[in-house]
Amino acid sequence: MKIHEYQAKELFKQYGIKVPSSVLCTDRSEIESILKKVKMPCVIKAQVHSGARGKAGGVKLAKDYISAVETANNILGMELKSKQAGMKKVNKILIEDAVDIDKELYLSLTFDRANECIAFIISPLGGMDIEEAAKNSPDKIYTELINENFNPIETIKRLGFNEQINKQIKEIVNALYKLALEKDASLVEINPLVITKNNEVIAIDAKMNFDDNALFRHEDILALKDETEENPFELEAQKDGLNYIKLEGTIGCMVNGAGLAMATMDVIRLAGKDAANFLDVGGGASSEKIEKAFKLLISDKNLEGVFINIFGGILRCDFLAEGVKNAIKTLNVQCPVIVRMEGTNKEKGAEILNESGLKFTVVKDLNEAIEVIRKI
Ligand code: GDP
Ligand code: MN
């Protein structure tokens, strides 16, 4: 789960990490009264779940009250287009005291899956071009894999700042590490962490992602969820207990089990197409659940065809067939539907589909599936 910058900054404050003072604004009618109380210059920042807001025009410095009012009115309500997240409507802005920046650093804690630990990453090349920096000067990105006796100071010293700055950075890293562990964060990122002209170290941006599987034990974090930021298809799927992720391709797929779902996406690739989604209906799905999943699948406008690939273990193939048959009947599905079933009651399942009078292609194995999908 992702949260907004202003929410991450509240958590930072609780853990003693310095952030600029700020006010959140969600309504145009409040802009002027808020800005009358804010110190100038200030920074107006779009609050959307997306990186690279600066480049997309969602972060602007305003030098006085008049220009701040204009900028705030422009950003609140705008459609922000970013490379990372597509189009996002800005429903909230953060109005923040501007900071006099001397240097911009990059700092993060993230999972290192290959080494099965948390990695601490710091770089003197922070700011809006960190991706470029990572490509062109990888030697300036310092990474430390965290073990039980984590002390970030040696890595911090590589940046070449004085002791007073190093100490401040160290305190921030330690606080961030505590925050990440206590709240089950999967990512904490400060880009940029700035050194001000007065030699203070302040987080002027804040990004946090959390492990969805741990949210049950963090009511406070779960309460920060902003449903308007979630993909509406994915939100619907969550309500029905389906694991669904929207993708960009044209072949919808419905599968049980995450491993089989990934293998199925490979099969679609082998047929020269791309998956329109990842959809795992789970092991014990009922025919009603299958119907709901199918409804979700075909509400996708890009769809050219659907591939159903089910291993009938706990979920029996005849249940699956009933669910799919009902869905196709009620929803009046026009695109080709290819079904591959293996496991419990697969003959009965195939019979239900073949006798339904509806158009299905029941394939005997994945090789045949590839041939059929290729021709869509
Ligand atoms: P992002 O583009 O979504 O990562 O948004 P950031 O919060 O990182 O802001 C983008 C850039 O705006 C930063 O890298 C800074 O260069 C600049 N910026 C943000 N806040 C301030 C500020 O208080 N003072 C100044 N001078 N620049 C700022
Ligand atoms: Mn940033």
Image: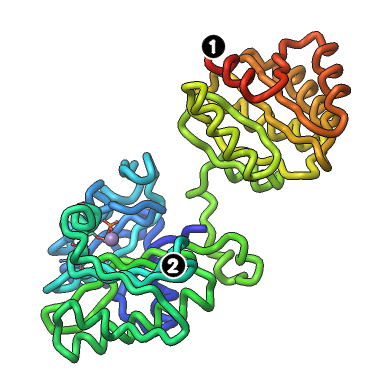
- SS label for mark 2: helix
From mark 2 to mark 1, how far is it between C-alphas? 49 Å
Q: Which residue is mark 1?
A: 375
Mark 2, Cα crowd under 10 Å, few <14 / some 14-19 / many 20+, is: some
- SS label for mark 1: loop
Quarter of image, res 277: top right
Residue 33 vs residue 64, the one in the foreground:
64
Q: Earlier in the sequence, mark 2 or mark 1?
A: 2
Residue 238 vs residue 225, the one in the foreground:
238
In the picture shown, does residue 195 fall above or below 343?
below
- Could you tell me residue 6's position as x and y percent? 39, 66
Q: Is mark 2 within 8 Å of ligand 1?
A: no
Quarter of image, res 39: bottom left
Which of discs 2 and 1 lies nearer the camera? The answer is 1
Mark sitting on residue 176: none
Q: Is residue 233 left or right of residue 4?
A: right
Furthest residue to the top?
357
Q: Amino acid at mark 1?
A: Lys
